[in-house]
Amino acid sequence: MIAPTSSRLGLLIVVSGPSGTGKTTLCRKACADGRAVFSVSCTTRPPRPGEVDGKDYFFLSEEDFLARIDRGELFEYARVHNRWYGTLKSYVFDNLRRGMDLLMDIDVQGAAQVRGCEDELVTRCLTDIFVMPPSLGELEARLSGRATDSPEVVALRLKNAEAEMQHWQDYRYCLVSGSREQDELKFNAILEAERLRSSLLITEDN
């Protein structure tokens, strides 16, 4: 019989949901104890106030982003809110192999690309969570309240949210957002359970 070692592969945790559901905050808090890292995505959108290149996103020109697609450097990518977003392959695979859980905050298009990946490492390590707003009215209030987007952008995000919410059943978990405290408890419970999966354990022959 082949026994597992004490080491394991990292989890690839895909998190999706409309803007304003708090999914990015959940991901960053889950990384605060050092047991996981937050995947830094590439984007062609301009930085928001306080955002730092290389920490929040890798801010790229559209020309640079499209060139990286052509070179096959992106694990997943999608055009959302008229901007490009994507994740570097090297960043994902390096973290999984060294046993570090990796949280990816990506849209439903990117999540579908990740699920469609046939690489054995990805299949073995993948789990996904959809963060659902309690209602569109509450989502509108959250988006307007953070005062980072124009009314036109808020309207676009709400329109996209309705389309995104149709995909919640594609995910292993659906977390309906409540208070921040409730969301954190549910989110952390999912991660703790997933970390015990036998598929992540490294045996003597792999």
Image (cartoon, helix red, strand yellow):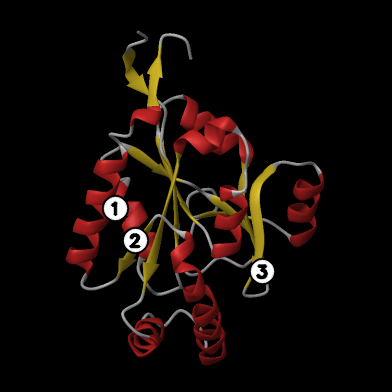
Q: Residue 29 got which mark?
A: 1
Q: Residues within 10 Å of mark 3 (few under 14, many from 20)?
A: few
Compared across the picture, whether 134 is left or right of 124 comes to left
Q: CA distance from mark 2 to mark 1?
A: 6 Å
Q: CA distance from mark 3 to mark 1?
A: 26 Å
Compared across the picture, whether 49 is left or right of 146 comes to right
Q: CA distance from mark 3 to mark 2?
A: 21 Å
Residue 193 visible in rendering: yes
Secondary structure beneath disc 1? Answer: helix
Residue 150 in the image: state x and y as whole percent. Answer: 52, 87
Q: Earlier in the sequence, mark 3 or mark 1?
A: 1
Q: Residues within 10 Å of mark 2 (few under 14, many from 20)?
A: some
Which quarter of the figure has residue 4?
Answer: top left
Which quarter of the figure has residue 66?
Answer: bottom right
* Residue at numbered disc 3: 83
- Labels 2 & 1 near each other (Cβ < 8 A): yes
Q: Amino acid at mark 1?
A: Lys
Secondary structure beneath disc 2? Answer: helix
Compared across the picture, whether 28 is left or right of 180 comes to right
- Of residues 202 and 140, the one drawn nearer to the viewer in this rendering: 202
Q: Residue 25 got which mark?
A: 2
